[in-house]
Image (cartoon, rainbow, N blue to C red):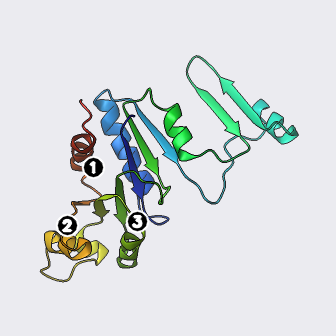
Amino acid sequence: MKPVIQICGYKNSGKTTLLAGLVEIFKGMNLHTAVIKHDVHGFEGDVEATDTYKLRKAGATATAITSPWRTAVVEECETPLTELIGRFQSYDLILVEGFKQAVYPKLVMLHHPEDVGLISQLGEIAALVCRREKEAGLLSEGESAFAWDALLSGEQIIPMFYADEVDKIAEWILKLVEVEK
């Protein structure tokens, strides 16, 4: 099974921004990275006026289009995360945005002080990612990130990164999942 890392957090916490930065770094290392995004609100993937859009609107339960450069598949059903991960086994690394209840190592995005409550709702937390201390208002004056980690996780120290430390996060992920560059 290829390595899977989840990026979890509330809406507008910086998940997609972090993912884009990580994908760019991994591409520079010649790692083929797949990304799976969960959208609980629904989405429109087809562009209006294209043939696939017209066919889907006409009632096709699934449409696919392929070219020498890309393939897109749109199905009128939810696909389980495990099945999507199975489809991406030819990639070096699989990054998942969302699917909070799945059981893969998670980087939890903390954007606002009230986001800390998310920690108690999740399992498999591998690291925390937040904005700089003073910007986020997550730490008291003089309190260190190390102390905050210990406070949040009880006895287990959970690594904490700042959202702008994308290179550091990428290196940590590669060590965690033992992907070779």
Judging by the rendered image, the residue that carries numbered circle 1 is: 166
Q: Amino acid at mark 3?
A: Leu
x and y percent of residue 133 in the render?
A: 23, 72
Q: Amino acid at mark 2?
A: Gln
Quarter-of-image position of residue 122: bottom left
Residue 156 badge: 2
Q: Quadrant of the N terminus?
A: top left
Asked whether, in this view, residue 151 is left or right of residue 11, the answer is left
Q: Between label 1 and label 2, give the one nearer the viewer.
A: 2
Looking at this view, name the residue that lies furthest to the top.
Answer: 68
Judging by the rendered image, the residue that carries numbered circle 3 is: 122
- In percent of the image, x 37 and y 39: which residue is there? 23
Instruction: Label 1, secondary structure: give it.
Output: helix
Mark 2 in CB contact with mark 3 (< 8 angstroms)? no
x and y percent of residue 62 in the render?
A: 75, 35
Distance (Cα) linking label 1 and label 2: 23 Å
- In percent of the image, x 32 and y 35: which residue is there? 26
